[in-house]
Amino acid sequence: MKRAACLVPALLAALNAPAAVAAPAGEATGPTLGAASNFGQHWQPGMFAAARRLGVRNFRDAVYWSEVERDHRYVFDTPDTTWPDHLAADQTTSLTVNNGHKGYDGGDTPYTPDAIRAFAADAAATVQHFPRADAVEVGNEMNAQNFVSGPVRAEGLAQRPARYLAILKATYAAVKSARPDLRVLGGALHSIPVGYVRRLFALGAARYMDALAFHPYTTPPEQLDRQIAVLRQVPGLAHMPLEATEFGDPDPATAPGTLLRYYCQLALAGVTRAVWYPLNPRGDGLTPLIGADLRPTPTGRAFATAQRLMEHRAVTDAAPDPFTYACRFAPDTLVIWGAPRRITPAPGQHAFSPEGRPMQGPLTLSESDPLILTGPGKPGLGRQRVLADSYDQFAYPGGAVRDGFERYAMDGAARVPLILMPGQEAGGRPWTPYLAARGNPDVRLQADTLLPGGGGTHVWRIVQDWHAPDAQRIRAEVQLAPAKRSGDGVRLRISLGGRLLEDRVVTSALDWKSPPLSVTKGEVLSVSVGPNGNARGDVTTYRITIRRDG
């Protein structure tokens, strides 16, 4: 493909340089990059050719059981069922097997032994027919409701692990019999629901998968490594390969940066494959790599840049502080973003936007749009003015991140500790790890949202305290936004050393900023959020930032 004219010679040289030597075994590397296509639903030769020009070498797609099994025979004879034949020697695909067949269990998600055996047999026949298929992903977001049907859906979440395991076990055996070399991906999870995974693995699921597949849509990139560390605590998952087989962004303006932020954090977490959703427009609002005009979008250009400069290259965490995120990919590519401050490339370094546009003049770090720096050396960074941030320093008990806040709940006048909850351990709970009041999981805290409880004369508040490390001048910022479904908003109280700075009911987005404040060593700035009249619908996004004054 003719490369965009905006790429200066320095980036062209980097993009055209020989691929880096594979990292030593056990060292973190940039994951294999893939794209989620839908050629199994509608073969598009022009889109396939455009993907080839972009350099896409790995796809996630399907060949549908309902279209190939006819009268108990497997027939691959339509454009939609033969599309993998078009894959070149350097291209591969994983095949997702999830949909039913009207000849078995009425087309619903298989649940009887005969239907499950037929489902598994189709998977085996399909991968045997297509040698460029290198993995089968069993199911698709089966811990959710959108991609299951019939009795499996109606039974609810409690029975889902056992139902899924029956399908996974049969498919694993059939596929491995046909293609012992082929990876079987299990889980097929929406989000990072550690509670659901615990139940699944307690039933023995680890024996029937080569990697765990997940779709981290509900996890911000900066929280990925922390949540995956909680996931790794599940028995059987400490060393199992992980594949993020869908991730994406609905906003075309932020999607190129989102792709790089996810890719960096997935690499540091040891994830082996990262699949952007989608390759092409799907009508669901998520930003594609290639537009309807068959030209790469800015996100597609970011994908190509990451593939060439980062894929399969050794990666190290280059973050200089808790408020800046950075990955260094061997030999000399740096991806960096975080709290705004001046950044100056080192002599010989060149700076680029996520989609590869050269950046000139004074540069400032962004929380949403990483910079790519190529070339040797370390960039110069301006003074870090952030002292504490509730999002950047959010931590789970026992994790590697040191929390900058003391966080707890108040049940009336009684202090209650927040404990780690795994996520999706029951209906109505978050689908990722979270903190909750001991004894009351309906009062909870995540990196960017909180939920108080109670109402009337008995309220549960979430409290986050910052302890000043020394005497200094600061400015405090609190962003708070109750959900629209909150009937009466939430009650915000901010105090310093016991002196009330703010006490108000918040019913819409608030961006509160303090005047300059003098603090003494050990003095506490406390931010408390409770219900107003009641806690119905009071899920509230929040962020607390403490900055140096001057």
Image (spheres, rainbow, N blue to C red):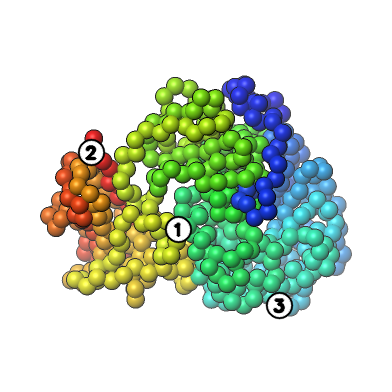
Q: Label 1: few (<14), some or many (≥20) within 10 Å?
A: few
Amino acid type, mark 2 = Asp
Q: Earlier in the sequence, mark 2 or mark 3?
A: 3
Q: Residue at x 16, y 45 (%)?
A: 518
Amino acid type, mark 3 = Thr
Q: Which residue is mark 2?
A: 549
Foreground tag (3 vs 1): 1
The residues bearing labels 3 and 1 have C-alpha atoms spaced at a distance of 45 Å
Q: Residue at x 49, y 59 (%)?
A: 227
Q: Which residue is mark 3?
A: 112
Please determine whether, in this image, residue 91 is positioned above or below residue 486. above
Residue 527 in sight in this render: no
Q: Residue at x 66, y 31 (%)?
A: 15
- Where is residue 505 shown, x and y percent of the image? 20, 55
**Nearest the camera: 79 or 26?**
26
Q: Secondary structure at mark 2?
A: loop
**Nearest the camera: 4 or 508?**
4
Q: Which residue is mark 1?
A: 400
Q: Label 3: few (<14), some or many (≥20) within 10 Å?
A: few
Q: Secondary structure at mark 3?
A: loop
Amino acid type, mark 1 = Ala
**Nearest the camera: 434 or 392?**
392
The residues bearing labels 1 and 2 have C-alpha atoms spaced at a distance of 29 Å
Q: Earlier in the sequence, mark 3 or mark 1?
A: 3
Q: Residue at x 25, y 55 (%)?
A: 467
